[in-house]
Image: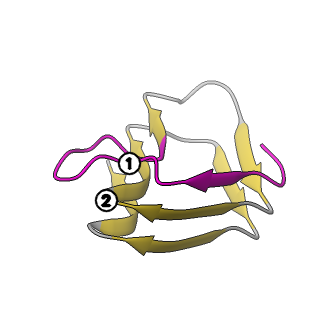
Amino acid sequence: MDNVEINNCSQYDTNKASLRFQGNKLSWSEIRNSAIHDGWGIGAYFENSANVKLTNNVFFAFVKRGVSIST
């Protein structure tokens, strides 16, 4: 993804984030020059993932947290 806005897309008190990577280990993914904001839960959630590149992004105004990384 490049130059994308994600607004108000996460759910409160869950791990359902605006942007979620789960079990992504084999292929490469990149999010750059994007704004992810104003959610009730988590902005970006990474679980059991590798090869994800974040470049020049802004995460703001989330109730739970902006970015969460688990294993």
Q: Estimate how packed mark 1 is, as few (under 14), some (14 to 19) or many (20 or more) residues with alpha carbons within 10 Å.
A: many
Magenta residue span:
1-19
Give the residue at mark 2: 40
Q: Residue at x 83, y 55 (%)?
A: 3
Side of 14 where 8 appears, left or right? right
Type of the residue with mark 2: Trp
Quarter of the figure with the N terminus: top right
Side of 43 where 59 appears, left or right? right
- Among the 4 quarters of the image, the one containing residue 5: bottom right
Q: Residue at x 32, y 48 (%)?
A: 71
Mark identifier at residue 10: 1
How many labels, in total? 2
- Please say if the residues under marks 2 and 1 sit with CB atoms less than 8 Å apart: yes
Q: Nearer the viewer, residue 61 or 2?
A: 61
Q: CA distance from mark 2 to mark 1?
A: 6 Å
Secondary structure at numbered mark 2:
loop
Mark identifier at residue 25: none
Side of 50 where 13 appears, left or right? left
Secondary structure at numbered mark 1:
loop
